[in-house]
């Protein structure tokens, strides 16, 4: 990526405005300390990902949420497919099975989409949680399953709302 002939990027001094090497600790003209952290962030943004700002990072909370989403998908599917037989289903079993499979795939695809900053990942996550809540009440699963989907919706609101502008 980098070659010897490539000139290092410049950063303007905050005090006097003279351009300095991004490697420099002090301004060559006035001697003011240069904001090295800011210089590094600008350097990375310019050299590696011009369209990505330093605020567009996944962060620990979002990463944990996406892992939780996949885990909750497994729990939901397990609870759905191992529900006690002999109940009195109010809807066709094959429809419920299809819905369960759809949730399984949706909760698998949604974290991947969210990780790649795709809006469809968020939509998929919200729709999946909505269908989960519907099925939980329809089939009569434990309230734990519904609270999991409600938690998902709450976390989407909490974690994704501040970074929604980065999704496309
Ligand atoms: Zn200066």
Image: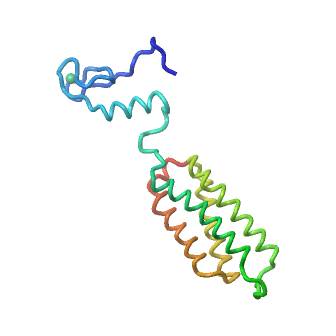
The structure residue drawn at horizontal position 45% and vertical position 13%, both measured from the top left corner, is 4
Q: Position of residue 46 (x, y in %)?
A: 44, 29
Instruction: Indicate the quadrant where residue 89 lies.
Output: bottom right
Image point (18%, 26%), residue name: 32
Using the image, determine if residue 148 lies above or below residue 3: below
Q: Residue at x 82, y 73 (%)?
A: 94
Say left or right for 47 vs 87.
left
Task: Name the residue at the top extreme.
Answer: 5
Rendered position, 107 above or below 90:
above
Ligand 1: quadrant of the figure: top left
Front position in the image: 23 or 42: 23
Image quadrant of residue 150? bottom right
The residue positioned 29% from the left and 20% from the top of the image is 19
Residue 30's x, y, as percent?
A: 17, 21
Residue 61 falls left or right of residue 21: right
How many numbered tags mark residues here? 0
Q: Is residue 35 above or below residue 116?
A: above
């Amino acid at each position: 990526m980098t070659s010897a002939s490539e000139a290092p990027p410049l950063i303007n001094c905050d005090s006097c405005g003279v351009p300095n090497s991004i490697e420099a600790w002090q301004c060559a003209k006035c001697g003011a300390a240069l904001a090295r952290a800011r210089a590094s962030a600008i350097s990375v943004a310019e050299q590696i990902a011009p369209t990505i700002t330093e605020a567009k990072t996944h962060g620990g909370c979002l990463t944990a949420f996406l892992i939780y989403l996949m885990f909750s998908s497994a729990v939901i599917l397990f609870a759905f497919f191992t529900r006690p037989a002999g109940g009195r289903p109010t809807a066709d079993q094959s429809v419920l099975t299809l819905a369960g499979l759809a949730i399984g795939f949706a909760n698998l695809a949604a974290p991947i989409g969210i990780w790649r900053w795709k809006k469809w990942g968020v939509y998929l996550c919200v729709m999946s949680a909505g269908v989960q809540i519907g099925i939980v009440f329809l089939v009569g699963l434990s309230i734990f399953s519904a609270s999991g989907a409600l938690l998902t919706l709450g976390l989407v609101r909490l974690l994704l709302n501040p970074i929604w502008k980065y999704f496309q």
